[in-house]
Amino acid sequence: QVQLVESGGGLVQAGGSLRLSCAASGRTFSRFPMGWFRQALGKEREFVAAIGWSFGSTGYADSVKGRFTLSRDNAKNTVYLQMNSLKPEDTAIYYCATITTEFAEWSTRIYDYDTWGQGTRVTVSS
């Protein structure tokens, strides 16, 4: 069973940067795609970015493309979401998630992900 723990959230001024981390338990981490989603107050949870299990193929929401970078370190069972040029509209709780099907492709759909972390809050002040 995989467990995910996010960290790295906080308060930052607009234009600043944060790096979120998601540490996963389980020996088969390297075989699972990983995704990040976010949920702002009063809004639905939305896709942010995802990374494949192999060769690091990635996908990003249009709203973060060019500002956010997702990477993974399989030796450390960790994925990183580097967030630059942050905007107030990036304020949300950020969730890490995975699809615990070995060698599955990453997805933008929330319901494809079966394991979630508890979330980490990101607040961007103007």
Image: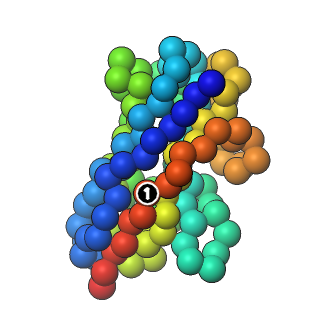
Looking at the image, can residue 106 be seen?
no
Q: Position of residue 63 (x, y in %)?
A: 50, 65
| Residue at (28% x, 57% y) in the render | 18
Q: Nearer the viewer, residue 62 or 1?
A: 1
The image shows a total of numbered marks equal to 1
Instruction: Say left or right for 108 vs 29.
Output: right
Q: In front: 44, or 119?
A: 119
In the displayed structure, would residue 10 be above or below residue 14?
above
User: Where residue 71 sits: x, y (%)?
Assistant: 39, 36
Instruction: Report crowding for label 1: few under 14, some 14 to 19, many 20 or more residues within 10 A (C-alpha).
Output: many
Which residue is tagged 1?
120
Does residue 46 lie above or below 22 as drawn? below
Which of the 4 image quarters holds residue 126? Answer: bottom left
Q: Is residue 122 visible?
A: yes
Which residue is situated farthest in the top direction here?
27
Quadrant assignment for the N terminus: top right
**In the image, 68: left or right of 44?**
left
**Does residue 54 lie above or below 12 as drawn?**
above
Percent from the top left, x then y, of residue 73?
36, 26
Name the foreground residue: 83 vs 5.
5
